[in-house]
Amino acid sequence: MGPDPVWCLERIVVNVNADTDHPHTFDNPNLADFGEDRRLWLGQEYGKQLHLKRYND
């Protein structure tokens, strides 16, 4: 795939301060379900950023 291969991202959830009184969860709703259309490609030709939405528990 060349010197800089692309990354296929199928799912991401980030928990910040999970063990505290103020946990925060960040997610991308476009990746919430599984399937061929639920993937993001990151690379020089596809995209370089991923946006996450904050969900407070």
Image (tube, rainbow, N blue to C red):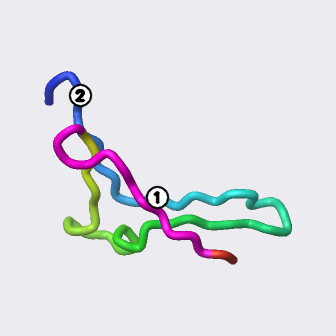
User: In front: 56, or 8?
Assistant: 56
The main secondary structure of the magenta stretch is loop
User: In front: 50, or 11?
Assistant: 50
Q: x, y percentage for residue 9?
A: 34, 53
Q: Which amino acid type is marked by label 2?
A: Asp
Residue under numbered circle 1: 12
Cα–Cα span, label 2 and label 1: 22 Å
Q: Going 66% across and 75% down the picture, which residue do you hit? A: 56
Residue under numbered circle 2: 4
2 lies left or right of 11: left
The span picked out in magenta is 44-55
**In which quadrant is the C terminus drawn?**
bottom right
Q: x, y percentage for residue 27?
A: 50, 66
Tell me which numbered mark, 2 or 1, is placed earlier along the sequence. 2
Q: Going 50% across and 69% down the picture, which residue do you hit? A: 53
Question: Which secondary structure, mark 2?
Answer: loop
Question: Which secondary structure, mark 1?
Answer: loop
Q: x, y percentage for residue 41?
A: 25, 51
Nearest-to-viewer mark from 2 and 1 = 2
Within-10-Å neighbours for mark 1: few <14, some 14–19, many 20+: few
Q: Which amino acid type is marked by label 1?
A: Ile
